[in-house]
Image: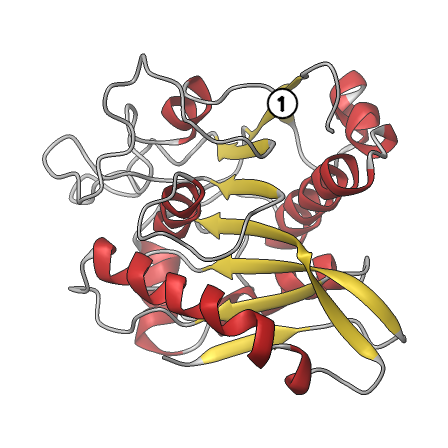
Amino acid sequence: MAAAGVVVKEEGSYPVILFFHGFSCVGSFYSDFLNLIASHGYVIAAPQLYVMPTTNQMQEIKSATEVIKWLPSGLNPLLPTNVEGDISKLSLVGHSRGGKTAFSLALGISRPSLPFSAVIGIDPVAGTKCFQPQPHILTPLSEPFKISAPITVIGTGLGPKSASPITCPCAPDGFNHVAFFKKCRPTCAHFVAVDYGHMDILNDNPPGITGLLTNIACKNGKGPRKLMRECCSGLVVASLKAYLENDESFLKAIYVDPSIAPVDLNPAKVIYKASFS
């Protein structure tokens, strides 16, 4: 299991993000997106949980659990001198199937060894109408997630649409961000980039056959991916500032006036508990 890390360079102790890649994606395809987040003061561990697309999701979750066990002893020795990852502020962030992995861990599946301070799903997907891999965390839809950490769900408007007449949607209705958010309890936030697609947070033109497939398998937005990466990274940072630091100013600014975002967001909402503590 390979892993990649994205870290800040200035001396200090920083919250840790564990990032899970999407279905059949390579972790390096997210480097531009993850660097934007890290530049705001976060240490990011982005393990390559599998290479073969036939890997079942329960095995993926088990691999993620092993990474979590490794973090307390294995992370800091790999960081630059005088940079420390604060795993007492550990957040789970995942894209696509990796979003479902993040939620599964937060639900206690595979018994992760550390608590989580926040969960963020970026266009999370739990399967299709014909096939939903284990674990079936969206069933029943009426039963809320038993997750104590605050949650942000980021969706795409084009994820439920097919790229061509012969392909399936990458984030189909009934199994995408809408269903995930329906099961969230406060504090939770929901933002949808209406003009962008499922793979639009990836780097521009990822290399190789796998990179080509990410460009053609899903319906993409017509706008620059750079704007989508900036928007989603900003939403992640704003969420973590609110959830980890009790600084709600950035998150509030976005949901009060979504037009400040670099892409069109609709909906843009946050449902609060009485406090984050």
- Res 234 visible: yes
- Res 205 visible: no
The residue tagged 1 is: 187
For the residue carrying disc 1, how many other residues have a C-alpha within 10 Å: few (<14), some (14-19), or many (20+)?
A: some
- Residue 221 shown left or right of residue 131 in the figure: right
Residue 271 against residue 99 in the figure, above or below: above
Q: Residue at x 36, y 60 (%)?
A: 214
Which image quadrant: the C terminus? top right
Residue 136 against residue 174 in the figure, above or below: below
Estimate the x, y position of residue 28 in percent, counting from the top left.
51, 73
**Tell me, what colour scheme is on the image?**
secondary structure
SS at mark 1 in the image: loop
Q: Residue at x 28, y 74 (%)?
A: 51
- Residue 16 shown left or right of residue 126 in the figure: right
- Residue 245 shown left or right of residue 59 in the figure: right
Residue 104 against residue 151 in the figure, above or below: below
Q: Quadrant of residue 171?
A: top left
Estimate the x, y position of residue 176 in percent, counting from the top left.
36, 31
Which image quadrant: the N terminus? bottom left
Estimate the x, y position of residue 104 in percent, counting from the top left.
36, 43
Q: Residue at x 41, y 23 (%)?
A: 178
Q: Amino acid at mark 1?
A: Thr
Give the tally of numbered discs.
1
Q: Residue furthest left?
A: 130
193, 144: nearer the viewer = 144
Q: Residue at x 36, y 52 (%)?
A: 111
Estimate the x, y position of residue 216 in percent, counting from the top left.
33, 56
